[in-house]
Image: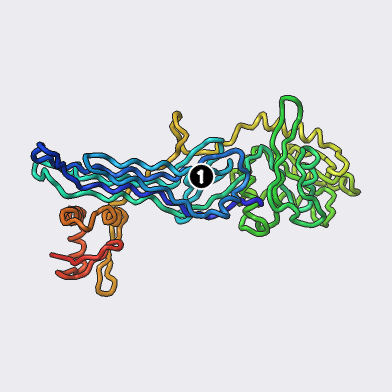
Amino acid sequence: MFVDSVRVYVKGGDGGNGMVAFRREKYVAAGGPAGGDGGRGANVVFVVDEGLRTLVDFRYQRHFKASRGENGRTKGQHGAGAEDMVVRVPPGTTVIDDDTQQVIADLVMDGQRAIIAKGGRGGRGNIRFATPANPAPEIAENGEPGQERYIRLELKVLADVGLVGFPSVGKSTLLSIVSAARPKIAEYHFTTITPNLGVVDIDEERSFVMADLPGLIEGAHEGVGLGHQFLRHVERTRVIVHVIDMAGSEGRDPYEDYVQINEELKLYNKKLEERPQVVAANKMDIPDADKNLEAFRKKVGEDLPIFPISAATKQGIRELMYKVADLLEETPAIPLVEDVVDEETTVLYKAEAEEDTFTVRRENEMYVVEGEKLEKLVKMTNLNSRDSIQRFARMMRNMGVDDALRKKGAENGDIVRIGKFEFEFVD
């Protein structure tokens, strides 16, 4: 089963909780705080495995939740960090945040790694909060929650050459002749519903990967027919071989076919206009094909390379493949990964700025405060500790939450909710 698009849930591991502890050893007077920090939560890391060719495994496992870090211990011992959760994906996988539609990573090279969901840091133990004014604090943080998100995985096949054209123009037949690939061939439209790859050997030193891509029809850039399932894979190819039924065996005009498909490519991605393109004028063994080819040449001009071929009789195939190989030598590799990665590491992660902003709204008789940093602060506060709650109240005051609640009309005794935590407002 060829699967090239799937939606999954990923969550980095939560950090371990910090510890509240004190030294109580014999002969050690006023030992002081000794609670260690929690360990780091595990990251969810995607790694490219060149042995994979499809995303079918993600059809059966759609949730990936990494392990949390160990809690801190007594005697100043820190909890152990969790090992990263490694998920293997095929080359050509693009990872997209399903909510923001932002590309998180473009994974194309074998062994390339990307952190998709970052684990939370461990909470600090009370040894971290000791000060001259408070030498014996009973404050410790809970672990930071791991990053969680829904992502969409899209697989774009990695091929040097892509065969494009309307359905039933002979793309699959051409691939079966020039390579050892055996795609399905039949006399009806959309026989090819998934990309087929084949290796074309020109001579001892030159070979390339060719992809037979699903047929294209008008409106494909909007998802009509096989739409994006076709166009997604064209983006990776360096050279486009445009296969046209020059005999017009289905009553279509070859020139109109040529214009229509190029328009669909341009509407999907303007960069596809810049790719080198060769026209394979197929079905030249059928009557009237020569006449149509002459008219086609007059309309497109002399600059476009056109090779009359017949996939059925193998006429002109050799000349076409040599021209494609020459174009590949002249065409530089397409930069697939736009993010700058440190040369000494293959791990890619974009640090995201944490928003200090928050909003206050009234919901029935309750005031609801919403903000990413505030909600994380609540989760990292030990609500069973009086000292931790007082620290949380001070931090809210410094962030301006108290003033914002007053402006909204909050008074003594009113209920305030932050995340799942509810408390009374005290002016």
Foreground pick, 132 / 67: 67
| Quarter residue 331 falls in | top right
Do we see residue 168 in this rendering? yes
Mark 1: amino acid: Val
Colour theme: rainbow
Q: Position of residue 351 (x, y in %)?
A: 38, 43
Which residue shows up at 19% across the image and 67% down it?
Answer: 424
SS label for mark 1 = strand
Foreground pick, 254 / 189: 189
Q: Position of residue 115 (x, y in %)?
A: 44, 43
Q: Position of residue 191 (x, y in %)?
A: 76, 54
Residue 394 in the figure: left or right of residue 282: left
Which residue shows up at 28% across the image and 49% down it?
Answer: 17
Residue 29 in the figure: left or right of residue 47: left
Do we see residue 276 in this rendering? no
Foreground pick, 3 / 257: 3
Foreground pick, 130 / 30: 30
Q: Residue placed farthest to the front in the image?
A: 26
Q: Which residue is mark 1?
A: 87
Q: Is residue 25 above or below residue 203?
A: below
Q: How many marks?
A: 1
Q: Quadrant of the C terminus?
A: bottom left
Which residue shows up at 31% across the image and 47% down it?
Answer: 16
Which residue shows up at 64% across the image and 49% down it?
Answer: 265
Residue 263 in the figure: left or right of residue 15: right
Label 1 crowd bin: few (<14), some (14–19), many (20+), radius 10 Å: some
Q: Position of residue 79 (x, y in %)?
A: 30, 42
Residue 313 in the figure: left or right of residue 302: right
Q: Is residue 37 above or below residue 406?
A: above
| Quarter residue 222 falls in | bottom right
Q: Residue placed farthest to the top in the image?
A: 205
Q: Residue placed farthest to the bottom in the image?
A: 364
